[in-house]
Amino acid sequence: MRFVVKLSPEIIIKSAPVRRRLIRQLRRNLRTLIAPVVPGTTITGDWDRLELSGAGPAPAAADRIADLLARTPGVSSFARVALYPLGDFDDMAEHAWRCYGASLAGRRFVVRVKRTGRHAFTSPQVEREVGGRLLARAEGASVSLDNPEITVRLEIVADQLYVVESRQPGIGGFPLGEQPPVLALMSGGFDSTVASYMLLRRGLRTHFCFFNLGGRAHALGVKEVAHFLWEKYSASHSVKFISVPFEGVVAEILTRVDDSQMGVVLKRMMLRAATAVARAWGVDALVTGESIAQVSSQTLPNLAVIDAVTDMLVLRPLIAMDKQDIIGIARAIGTEPFAASMPEYCGVISVKPTTHARRERVERAEAAFDFAILERAIAARTEEDIESVMEGAVGQIAVETFQAPQPGVTILDVRHPDQCADRPLRAGSVPVEAVPFYRLQQFFAQVSPEKPYLLYCDKGVMSRLHAELLVERGFTRVAVYRP
């Protein structure tokens, strides 16, 4: 197993000292991510590429490494390669045939060569010589320089030949850990999840701050999507999930603040609380998901009034993006299903909201607010490591666990669709249905509480959390499957 990793172009254009520092960070991050998958994998190279090599793991492990590389910030693209001594044209053609020969028959193909170092031949010469030899061996094949069906990719570095077996894009950006951390205000919807991802991609370790307005089910949904973002795009670094109980703050706003000012006042309270949390963790910037004029509280005058309560930098990566573009990114990064099923609680307190807030009027409205309630909410916050954020929510309701399915039961695989595709669950003759956890509420709205179900996930945490919620709703025949 061998991979060649191409660095993000933004790393390559940096000065030599900065470039070396970023590459060292990327190597550390990759070691952290890959060590649990394939112990003993070596990472070498610098300047514009890295090489990963291991002692020939099972194909599934190599696929897992490819999956990690595809979502690691700082990686522009990567290729799975086979490495050989350079040899002559016959040797090059033989190595290329070993990889591509079975797929060339009856197809249009082209050979493309990249070369580094001094050689007695040119890259076009290698393309012609190797291409001619492959053409002679591939029945019914033809060469097409402009419209090939297959591109045979070779890279020559000094006296070594790399045959590129497959190539995939990465997400680019910068490696995590070289920038100071930030604190993202996380509601679980499209905007906050995409904003968090965009900062992760730029190499900023992102903590999550959630203002709980909707009870346990809402908190669980936000924890799920925050954990998903961390696990998929930033698992090389630990971060915190901070939950601030904001029900009392909302109640005080509803009873003390004029209707038109409620939305702006709520956002100001959130920003005050987030500033206090950020300072406690030594974080110097906040991240929010506002997009200019998307909703009433996100006009320029309103944002200016909201920001007036903090002297901390507020980053808004979505500020000029259209909603459909934001949803498109959410779909691409895997957070769309979470966001689509997440209730939007902030809207419930906005009645005829102002779109042109005036600071003096908002401050007069806040004069009736009991700020001791805000201080108590900040003091009552919970802070959890993101790695174990789901584990801390289990155990509130008794739920049975079975190692083997019972007669008449149906197993529901509640994992994310990507995990189901990578590692399908099989349980012999017992029926298994893939119902991602974010669709469980819809699924159970259409079934009888008398029908028995077992929920399954890899670690047994997500399945138990949702089993507890369902038992609480009256589906007492729901249990957990842990084979």
Image (cartoon, grey):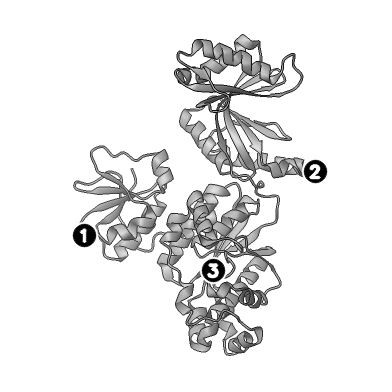
Q: Are marks 2 and 1 in contact (CB under 8 Å)?
A: no
Return the residue at label 2: 15
Residue 421 coordinates in the image, percent (x, y): 40, 40
Return the residue at label 1: 448
Q: Are marks 2 and 3 in contact (CB under 8 Å)?
A: no
Q: CA distance from mark 3 to mark 1?
A: 40 Å
Residue 166 coordinates in the image, percent (x, y): 54, 29
Q: Where, quadrant-wise, is the N terminus in this rendering?
A: top right
> In the rendered view, does 414 fall on the left or right side of 235?
left
Callout 3: few (<14), some (14-19), or many (20+) C-alpha neighbours within 10 Å? some
Residue 398 in sight: no
Hey, what amino acid is under mark 1?
Ser
Q: Earlier in the sequence, mark 2 or mark 3?
A: 2
Q: Nearer the viewer, residue 229 or 145?
A: 145
Residue 135 coordinates in the image, percent (x, y): 53, 14
Callout 2: few (<14), some (14-19), or many (20+) C-alpha neighbours within 10 Å? few
Callout 1: few (<14), some (14-19), or many (20+) C-alpha neighbours within 10 Å? few
Residue 9 in sight: yes
Return the residue at label 3: 294
Hey, what amino acid is under mark 3?
Gln
> In the rendered view, does 107 fall on the left or right side of 428?
right
The answer to which image quadrant residue 129 occupies is top right
